[in-house]
């Protein structure tokens, strides 16, 4: 119980440091409504959804301030991203099957939005994202800003159809000998596919353009070997008249895991999905003489934690992380007091430190697990605190 309280306290403390440790202010600029450009430092949070405001500093020594879409026409972070304010007609129709409308045509509404620049040239491509809604816009030297139209809808026969008008928009407005209707016939409404067409158009006309789409980082997957020590305890309760309760105390045991970490490509790579198949065991002897044939415990299993990890960056080489996982337990041949052990799932949370993207250490707490859940008259509490060391193989 003391260790659990300490772990919760540490988690709370680290979370409170979040705003100070994980996101930096980077060189950038903004242009206000009077067309005045100000060079500054902008807080880069690698927005997943298009922002409506941002924080900036004039210098490292000055306090941070906030600007909104109402007072800024454009802002950018050097060599990273650029956002331009537009008054646009946007269709926010849902793509969720149960929310599809029966109308093929988009329902436009005029809004003031920061659009993210993907390609800037004679033909420019922009992106807008708001949770589940993703819309692409385009602009040419002869045409103002317009949404590329893509909409799913239901017919009167309750069949799902798609309005792919964006393909005709591209064909009519991006005339180029290298772009044919065949090229656009089956093009996806995706950043990758649209980026390819806009690059081809600007190259076709020998026009210079700027590609703001950052290259995908090569370290979005990590394979980590994770040995460590488990401090586990087991208490078995019994509703029979004899031997009602048995506390096996704490035992130390070796554990070994292989962690697959998938870094998510937003919010500056601070989130990851983790899967860690792990071998663990617990052996203990009955401390009281009983008439049970085999009163000891020999429990072995393959744990399969699946969860999320959040990184808090301290500097270029150091970061703290917080885990939360659901653990599916696959029991190997095991017994608890002459009873076959059953699989029982539980949860885990942990905190750790990573150095140089290579070495790590983690303290992890698991909630209780019932190893005798298949027996009506018996209940058991199995708990574990782990000290885990990590080394990145890939």
Image (cartoon, rainbow, N blue to C red):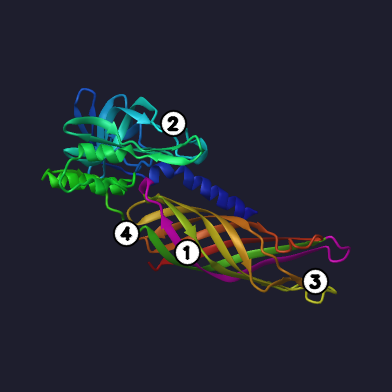
Numbered mark located on residue 218 in the image: 4
Q: Main secondary structure of the magenta part?
A: strand
Q: Nearer the viewer, mark 2 or mark 3?
A: 2
Res. 257 visible in picture: yes
Numbered mark located on residue 288 in the image: 3
* Snapshot quadrant of residue 66: top left
Numbered mark located on residue 259 in the image: 1
Q: Which residue is mark 2?
A: 103
Tell me how far mark 2 sits from mark 1, CA to CA: 47 Å
Helix, strand or loop status at disc 4: loop
Q: Are marks 2 and 3 in contact (CB under 8 Å)?
A: no
Q: Which is nearer the N-term, disc 1 or disc 3? A: 1
Residue in the foreground of this view, choosing between 349 and 136: 136
Mark 2: few/some/many CA within 10 Å (<14, 14-19, 20+): some
In the visual, does 288 lie left or right of 104? right
Q: Which residues are drawn in magenta?
A: 239-268
Q: Which is nearer the N-term, disc 4 or disc 3? A: 4
Tell me how far mark 1 sits from mark 4, CA to CA: 18 Å
Q: Which is nearer the N-term, disc 2 or disc 1? A: 2
- Which residue is farthest bottom? 293
Tell me how far mark 2 sits from mark 3, CA to CA: 75 Å
**Total marks drawn?**
4
């Amino acid at each position: 119980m003391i260790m659990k309280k300490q772990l919760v306290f540490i988690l709370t403390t680290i979370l409170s440091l979040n705003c100070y440790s994980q996101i930096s202010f980077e060189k950038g600029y903004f242009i206000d409504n009077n067309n005045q450009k100000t060079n500054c430092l902008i807080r880069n949070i690698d927005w997943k959804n298009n922002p409506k405001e941002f924080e900036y500093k004039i210098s490292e020594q000055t306090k941070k301030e906030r600007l909104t879409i109402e007072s800024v026409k454009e802002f950018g972070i050097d060599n990273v991203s650029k956002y331009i304010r537009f008054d646009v007609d946007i269709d926010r129709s849902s793509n969720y099957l149960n929310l599809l409308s029966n109308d093929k045509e988009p329902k436009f509404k005029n809004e003031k939005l920061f659009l993210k620049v993907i390609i800037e040239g004679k033909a420019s491509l922009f992106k807008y994202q708001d949770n589940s809604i993703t819309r692409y816009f385009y602009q040419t030297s002869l045409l103002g800003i317009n949404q590329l139209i893509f909409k799913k809808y239901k017919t009167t026969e309750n069949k799902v159809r798609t309005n792919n008008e964006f393909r005709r928009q591209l064909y009519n407005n991006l005339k180029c000998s290298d772009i044919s209707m065949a090229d656009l016939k089956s093009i996806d409404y995706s950043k990758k596919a649209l980026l390819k067409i806009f690059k081809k158009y600007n190259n076709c006309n020998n026009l210079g353009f700027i590609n703001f789409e950052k290259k995908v980082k090569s370290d979005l997957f990590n394979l980590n070997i994770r040995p460590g020590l488990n401090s586990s305890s087991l208490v078995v309760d019994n509703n029979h008249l004899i031997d009602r309760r048995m506390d096996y105390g704490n035992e130390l045991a070796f554990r070994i895991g292989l962690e697959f970490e998938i870094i998510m490509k937003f919010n500056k790579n601070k989130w990851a999905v983790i899967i860690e198949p792990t071998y663990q065991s617990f052996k203990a002897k009955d401390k009281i003489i009983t008439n049970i044939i085999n009163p000891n415990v020999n429990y072995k299993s393959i744990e399969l934690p699946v969860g999320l990890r959040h990184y808090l960056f301290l500097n270029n080489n150091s970061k703290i992380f917080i885990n939360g996982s659901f653990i599916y337990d696959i029991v190997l041949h095991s017994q608890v007091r002459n009873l076959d052990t059953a699989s029982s799932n539980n949860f885990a949370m942990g905190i750790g430190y990573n150095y140089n993207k290579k070495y790590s250490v983690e303290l992890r707490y698991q909630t209780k697990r019932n190893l005798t859940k298949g027996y009506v008259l018996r209940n058991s509490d199995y708990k574990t605190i782990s000290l885990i060391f990590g080394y990145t193989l890939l």
